[in-house]
């Protein structure tokens, strides 16, 4: 385990403050952690005196993002990701919530099997190409078709995030090694 000096910690603090990060987490995701993150964000939104509409949008989008992380984080990955020959680490997730003058950003990231990159990218691009009405139509069709993935969902998560945020989904996929890639999602919520 590496040590962080007080100076290094202060630099991290200053960087988070400068970027308006109100919550930042990196590690393994558990049901208890999900509950804690939602509680912290609820408290922060109350402290900022946000409208009920904004609170609901941020909270609903965050719930969907966290459920995606929880259900799709590392079950399909190899048991361990090799960082170097001598150092091994279990895959983990990252969650950040930032407040800015325009609203909020919810950023998440996790490892995915590289073999799933094409399918995921196509799905997100398909969602981004839809109008508001088309999104609603596809959401309702997906909801009623009765099909479920092996993870339990019917592909509703990203549709719901796009619908509730009212914005296109910003995402990135970076190859990590031969088997895995890092997927990041940035959801903007306007005030």
Image (spheres, helix red, strand yellow):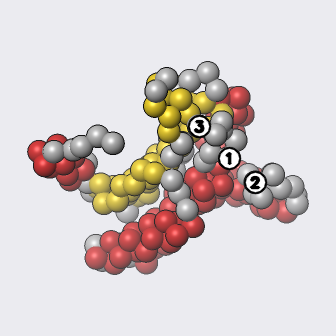
The circle on residue 151 is 2
Q: Which one is earlier in the sequence, the residue at label 3 or at label 1?
A: 1
Q: Image check: 56 left or right of 100?
A: right
Q: Which residue matches tag 3?
A: 80
Q: Image check: 188 left or right of 156?
A: left
The circle on residue 75 is 1
Q: On the image, which quarter does residue 71 sit in?
A: bottom right
Q: Is residue 58 above or below residue 126?
A: below
Q: Secondary structure at mark 3?
A: loop
- Kindly indicate whether the residue at mark 2 contacts the one at mark 1 (C-beta within 8 angstroms): yes
Q: Depth-wise, is mark 3 or mark 1 nearer the camera?
A: 3
- Give the spatial CA distance, label 1 vs label 2: 10 Å
Name, please, the residue furthest toward the right: 146
Observer able to see residue 134: yes
The circle on residue 31 is none
Q: Which one is earlier in the sequence, the residue at label 3 or at label 2?
A: 3
């Amino acid at each position: 385990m590496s040590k962080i000096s007080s100076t290094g910690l202060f630099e991290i603090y200053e960087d988070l403050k400068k970027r308006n990060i109100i919550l930042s987490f990196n590690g393994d995701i558990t049901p208890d952690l999900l509950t804690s993150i939602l509680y912290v964000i609820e408290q922060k939104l109350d402290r900022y005196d946000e409208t009920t509409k904004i609170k609901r949008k941020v909270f609903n989008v965050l719930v969907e993002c966290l459920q995606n992380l929880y259900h799709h984080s590392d079950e399909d990955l190899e048991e361990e990701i090799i960082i170097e020959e001598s150092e091994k680490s279990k895959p983990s997730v990252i969650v950040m919530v930032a407040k800015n003058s325009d609203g909020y950003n919810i950023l998440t990231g996790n490892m995915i099997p590289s073999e799933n990159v094409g399918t995921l990218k196509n799905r997100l691009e398909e969602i981004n190409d839809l109008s508001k009405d088309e999104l609603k139509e596809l959401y309702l069709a997906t909801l009623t078709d009765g099909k479920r993935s092996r993870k339990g969902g019917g592909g509703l998560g990203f549709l719901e995030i796009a619908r509730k945020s009212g914005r296109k989904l910003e995402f990135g996929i970076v190859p990590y090694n031969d088997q895995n890639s890092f997927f990041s999602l940035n959801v903007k919520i306007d005030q």
